[in-house]
């Protein structure tokens, strides 16, 4: 079973553009790769230009499919499937879809790159809440969510 995710970026126009990522959408894979390799908004634009993804990798350019996570595997570029992305007129519209409509009910993680108060782009993540169909935790900084997950895993290992 796949951990599905969507990856969005708030554009300078205010529009939000994003793609679906089918495999390994959790914090330990897609979240970690975004946090490590996708700080540059221009690189994120290149990623979004590929359309929906089978798997996220550290490099946007086409490459060997193994080892997985080294290069992005895109449905359109790598398999010739129809190109697709998702757009919203604003972050507020995306947030409304996320919290009020259940539009993302099959998506486990929603990643959004958006500018902070100083204009620097930051990654945020909203995780699907377990046992609560269609509900997500409030978006938070991705790096903080990853750090918290690592702390939880280390505490669990110490308890064992």
Image (tube, helix red, strand yellow):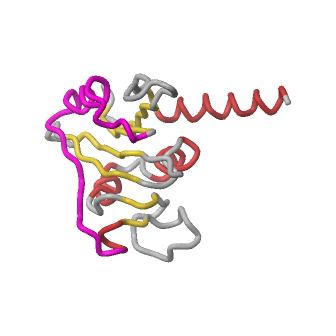
Indicate left or right for 81 with 147 as reference.
Answer: left
Measuring from the top left, give residue 131's x and y in whole percent.
Answer: 50, 26
Q: Residue at x 37, y 50 (%)?
A: 40
Q: How many marks can you see? A: 0
Measuring from the top left, give residue 96's x and y in whole percent.
Answer: 24, 26
Q: Residue at x 71, y 33 (%)?
A: 153
Relative height, residue 53 to residue 159 (above, below): below
Q: Is residue 91 a member of the stretch shown in magenta?
A: yes
- Give, as a single range, the part of the protein colored magenta: 79-107
Q: Is residue 117 a member of the stretch shown in magenta?
A: no
Q: Residue at x 52, y 43 (%)?
A: 26
Quarter-wise, where is residue 42 in the image?
Answer: bottom left
Viewer-proximal residue, 145 or 55?
A: 55
Quarter-wise, where is residue 160 in the image?
Answer: top right
Viewer-proximal residue, 44 or 55?
A: 55
Measuring from the top left, give residue 74's x and y in whole percent.
Answer: 37, 65
Q: Residue at x 37, y 29 (%)?
A: 134
Measuring from the top left, give residue 66's x and y in whole percent.
Answer: 56, 73
């Amino acid at each position: 079973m796949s951990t599905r995710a969507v990856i969005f970026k708030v554009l300078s126009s205010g529009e939000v553009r994003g793609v679906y990522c089918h495999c390994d959408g959790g914090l330990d894979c897609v979240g970690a790769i975004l946090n490590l390799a996708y700080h540059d908004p221009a690189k994120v634009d290149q990623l979004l230009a590929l359309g929906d993804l089978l798997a996220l990798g550290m490099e946007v350019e086409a490459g060997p499919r193994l080892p997985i996570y080294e290069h992005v595997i895109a449905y359109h570029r790598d398999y010739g499937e129809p190109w697709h992305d998702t757009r919203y007129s604003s972050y507020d519209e995306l947030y409304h879809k996320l919290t009020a409509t259940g539009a993302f009910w099959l998506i486990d993680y929603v990643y959004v790159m958006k500018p902070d108060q100083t204009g620097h782009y930051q990654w945020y993540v909203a995780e699907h809440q377990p046992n609560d169909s269609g509900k997500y935790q409030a978006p938070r900084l991705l790096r903080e969510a990853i750090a918290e997950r690592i702390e939880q895993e280390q505490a669990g290992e110490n308890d064992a």
